[in-house]
Image: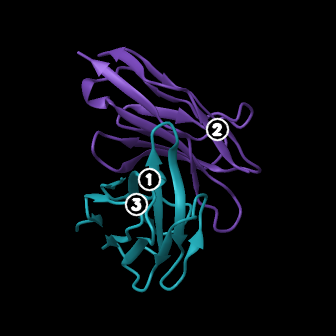
Amino acid sequence: NAGVTQTPKFRVLKTGQSMTLLCAQDMNHEYMYWYRQDPGMGLRLIHYSVGEGTTAKGEVPDGYNVSRLKKQNFLLGLESAAPSQTSVYFCASSTGTGDEQYFGPGTRLTVT
Amino acid sequence: GNSVTQMEGPVTLSEEAFLTINCTYTATGYPSLFWYVQYPGEGLQLLLKATKADDKGSNKGFEATYRKETTSFHLEKGSVQVSDSAVYFCALKGTRGYSTLTFGKGTMLLVSP
């Protein structure tokens, strides 16, 4: 039982490049989330999903897109990376929005 | 909207000292309250939670009491260990529909031997 895994762990992009971050969970959770963590800002919700095929915007959705084609996977895409998107990205999942969220180990992204 | 305010860190303590990390919140109704902990290089994990007023959450020697009258959920531990060094996040889940978690900015705790 791996829990929540994230791929890749580290990535460096140049401004304007695109990439996709993959989150996978093996707990059969309905809800999945993408957060970014920045110094002094805590965790901010980017997008979330309440089930396969659904997505919703969080607090800071601009510049990101997401897809939830399979229940166990939640993809975060950056179409044209900007230095302001340098951050640590965490994925999480839960059985419901009020339940304990299980976090992945994070992806450290640097945009130069 | 919902918000969470935590004391700024870092909090620096010696081993076996008493710990308090303050957390206050703004929300309508009766939100659920959580403390998450992030150890270096890892994701967050749930430490404890409380879902109604006067509930006390506890885990691994940490405690927090849901105080509706002061809108607070302060984290306490009677005797900290070096292994407790981490970043602690207070969070709330509102009462409306698909309400998601709102996190505070986190408080770093450093415990020295």
In percent of width and height, residue B61 lies at: 37, 31
Q: Is residue A35 above or below residue B50?
A: below
Colour scheme of the rendered structure: by chain
Q: CA distance from mark 1 to mark 2?
A: 45 Å
Along the line of sight, which residue is nearer the eye, B64 or B11?
A: B11
In percent of width and height, residue B43 lies at: 34, 50
Marks 3 & 1, CB-CB < 8 Å contact: yes
Quadrant of the snapshot with the C terminus of chain B: top left
In percent of width and height, residue B52 lies at: 64, 47
Residue beneath disc 2 = B54
Along the line of sight, which residue is nearer the eye, A36 or B18?
A: A36
Question: Which chain is the one coloured cyan?
Answer: A
| Residue B64 falls left or right of residue A22 | right
Residue beneath disc 1 = A83
Q: Residues within 10 Å of mark 3 (few under 14, many from 20)?
A: some
Q: Amino acid at mark 1?
A: Pro
Q: Colour of chain B?
A: purple
| Residue A88 falls left or right of residue A41 | left
In percent of width and height, residue B4 lies at: 62, 40
Instruction: Indicate the secondary structure of the residue bearing disc 2.
Output: loop
> Given the image, what chain letter belongs to the residue carrying mark 3?
A
Along the line of sight, which residue is nearer the eye, B1 or A109?
A: A109
Tell me the mark number nearer the camera, choosing from 2 and 3.
3
Q: Which mark is residue A15?
A: 3
Q: Amino acid at mark 2?
A: Asp
